[in-house]
């Protein structure tokens, strides 16, 4: 892999984090999906977990509670593989936030009542 490709990969990853942290979940998914699908990655399952995480929160914005729950459960399976951390990220914090998110979704009657304080910020 050449330096230009490495730079593009890093840019896609960081743009995804920036979009996610700004609650532009669909955009985050797009950046990470480009990274995941266009390049051979050693941590492809981690990136796939982030894609599913971002789409889960996107589903909440679209009032799709079942889609959100499904994606959060799928992303947990992948993120658990990286509990020790990945790309300088404390994955345990994300996993904890996802558990709180699922708990919140299971407790509310209307998805519009979702507590957005449960959505994590990704620090890289």
Image (cartoon, rainbow, N blue to C red):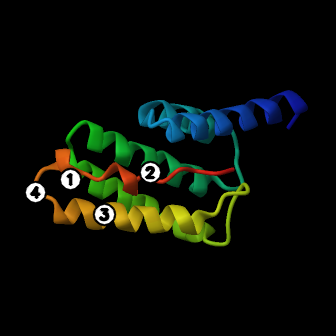
N-terminal label among 1 and 2: 2
Task: Judge left or right: residue 45 versus residue 116.
Answer: right
Q: What's the distance in space between the residues labelled 1 and 4, CA to CA?
A: 12 Å
N-terminal label among 2 and 4: 2
Numbered disc 4: secondary structure: loop
Q: Which mark is residue 53?
A: 2
Q: Mark 3 or mark 1, which is nearer to you?
A: 3
Numbered disc 2: secondary structure: helix
Q: Which mark is residue 120?
A: none
Q: Is residue 64 above or below residue 105?
A: above
Q: Which mark is residue 102?
A: 3
Residue at figure coordinates x 59%, y 56% from the top left: 46
Q: What's the distance in space between the residues labelled 3 and 2, CA to CA?
A: 12 Å
Q: Is residue 73 above or below residue 16?
A: below
Residue 79 percent location from the top left of the image = 53, 63
Cβ–Cβ under 8 Å for marks 1 and 2: no
Q: Which mark is residue 66?
A: 1
Residue 59 percent location from the top left of the image = 29, 42
Q: Is residue 90 above or below residue 9?
A: below
N-terminal label among 3 and 1: 1
Q: Which class describes the residues within 10 Å of circle 4: few (<14), some (14-19), or many (20+)? A: few
Task: Judge left or right: residue 42 versus residue 101.
Answer: right
Q: What's the distance in space between the residues labelled 1 and 2, CA to CA?
A: 14 Å
Residue 122 percent location from the top left of the image = 58, 50
Q: What's the distance in space between the residues labelled 3 and 1, CA to CA?
A: 11 Å
Q: Which class describes the residues within 10 Å of circle 3: few (<14), some (14-19), or many (20+)? A: some
Q: What's the distance in space between the residues labelled 2 and 4, CA to CA?
A: 22 Å
Q: Which class describes the residues within 10 Å of circle 2: few (<14), some (14-19), or many (20+)? A: many
What residue would you read off at disc 4? 109
């Amino acid at each position: 892999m050449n330096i230009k490709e490495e730079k593009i990969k890093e840019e896609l990853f960081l743009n995804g984090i920036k979009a996610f942290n700004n609650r532009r979940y669909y955009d985050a998914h797009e950046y990470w999906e480009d990274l995941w699908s266009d390049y051979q990655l050693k941590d492809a399952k981690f990136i796939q977990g982030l894609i599913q995480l971002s789409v889960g929160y996107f589903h909440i914005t679209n009032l799709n509670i079942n889609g959100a729950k499904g994606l959060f459960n799928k992303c947990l399976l992948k993120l658990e593989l990286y509990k020790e951390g990945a790309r300088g990220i404390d994955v345990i914090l994300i996993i904890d936030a996802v558990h709180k998110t699922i708990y919140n979704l299971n407790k509310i009657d209307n998805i519009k009542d979702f507590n957005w304080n449960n959505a994590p910020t990704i620090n890289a």
